[in-house]
Image (cartoon, rainbow, N blue to C red):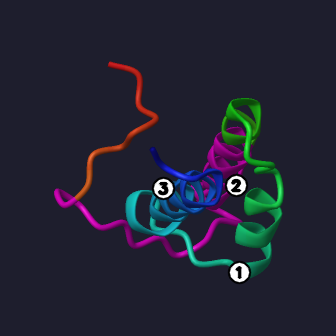
Amino acid sequence: MVSEHAAYCNSLRVLAELWDDLKGMSDVANAAAAMGEFDGSDAGIATAVAAIDGFHEAALNPNSGEFLMPVVGVLDDPFSVA
């Protein structure tokens, strides 16, 4: 059985992979804000993913967006809806 702490850490790892590997974002302040939404619960994961998606949408803005460099073809998005 996986301990609660290990499950919490694994969820943070997956959220971090979504942030930098899959979305290609690197703004540390935004990352801290998004990760701060995660409280260890399933609802916290959903809230953090929503925050990540919101920051990603803002980063895609052609006038005020960010430089994005996602890692393509290495990881599957665990939160994508098939």
**Type of the residue with mark 1:** Val
For the residue pair 75 and 68, the one nearer the viewer reads as: 75
Q: Is residue 48 left or right of residue 22?
A: right
Residue at point 57% right, 55% down?
Answer: 60
Mark 2–mark 3 Cα distance, whole angstroms, equals 17 Å
Mark 1–mark 3 Cα distance, whole angstroms, equals 17 Å
**Type of the residue with mark 3:** Val
Mark 3 closeness class: few <14, some 14–19, many ≥20 residues within 10 Å: some
- Disc 1, disc 2: CB below 8 Å? no
Point out residue 12 in the picture as x, y percentages from the top left corner. 59, 60
According to the picture, the residue beneath numbered tag 3 turns out to be 14
In the rendered view, tell whether residue 26 sits above or below residue 2: below
Residue at point 51% right, 63% down?
Answer: 13
SS category of the residue bearing label 1: helix
Dot placed on the residue nearer the N-terminal end, 1 or 3: 3
Mark 2 closeness class: few <14, some 14–19, many ≥20 residues within 10 Å: many
For discs 2 and 3, the disc positioned in front in the rendered view? 3
According to the picture, the residue beneath numbered tag 1 turns out to be 28
Q: Quadrant of residue 78?
A: top left
SS category of the residue bearing label 2: helix
Quarter of the rendering occupied by the C terminus:
top left
Mark 1 closeness class: few <14, some 14–19, many ≥20 residues within 10 Å: few
Q: Is residue 36 left or right of residue 75?
A: right
Mark 1–mark 2 Cα distance, whole angstroms, equals 12 Å
SS category of the residue bearing label 3: helix
Q: Quadrant of residue 61?
A: bottom right
Point out residue 3 in the picture as x, y percentages from the top left corner. 57, 53
In magenta, the rendered stretch is: 48-74
For the residue pair 38 and 6, the one nearer the viewer reads as: 6
For the residue pair 20 and 63, the one nearer the viewer reads as: 20
Magenta highlight on residue 56: yes
